Amino acid sequence: MSYEKVLQAQKVVIGTKQAVKALKEGNVQELVVASDAETKVTAKVVEVALGIEVPVRYVDSMKKLGKACGIEVGAAAVAIIR
């Protein structure tokens, strides 16, 4: 389900560092996190999202999440921009 949301999104920010920045700017509608990403990589972005009450959705694969964003590599986190 969340892969489709990423595919249909007008604008996304790929990666944990960029997602944290977008979250702090208040531009994020929803955060999508890959369950197979290392927790130490995704912990900060999830913490920030939950702290400002942005919904966090989990998908099973970094590879599929990256593909949904149109990149050749896996993505640990993707922020869907408003």
Image (cartoon, rainbow, N blue to C red):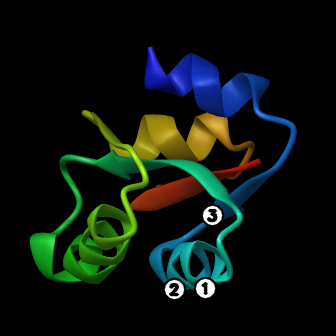
Residue 52 horizontal/vertical position (percent) = 39, 68
Closer to the camera in the image, 19 or 51: 51
The disc at residue 21 is 1
Closer to the camera in the image, 51 or 38: 51
**SS category of the residue bearing label 3:** strand
Residue 69 horizontal/vertical position (percent) = 68, 43
Label 3 belongs to which residue?
A: 14
The disc at residue 17 is 2
1 and 2 marks in contact (CB < 8 Å): yes
For the residues marked 3 and 2, what is the alpha-carbon distance in whole angstroms?
Answer: 9 Å
Closer to the camera in the image, 82 or 8: 82
What residue type is disc 2 on?
Lys
Residue 22 horizontal/vertical position (percent) = 65, 75
For the residues marked 1 and 3, what is the alpha-carbon distance in whole angstroms?
Answer: 11 Å
Residue 36 horizontal/vertical position (percent) = 19, 50
Q: Which-is-in-front pick, marks 1 and 3? A: 1
Residue, x 12% and y 71% (percent of image)? 39
Q: Is residue 8 left or right of residue 30?
A: right
Q: Which-is-in-front pick, marks 1 and 2? A: 1
Residue, x 38% and y 44% (percent of image)? 55
Q: Is residue 75 visible?
A: no
Q: Is residue 32 left or right of residue 21?
A: left
69 w.r.t. 47: above or below: above
Considering every residue shown, the one lying at the far left of the view is 39
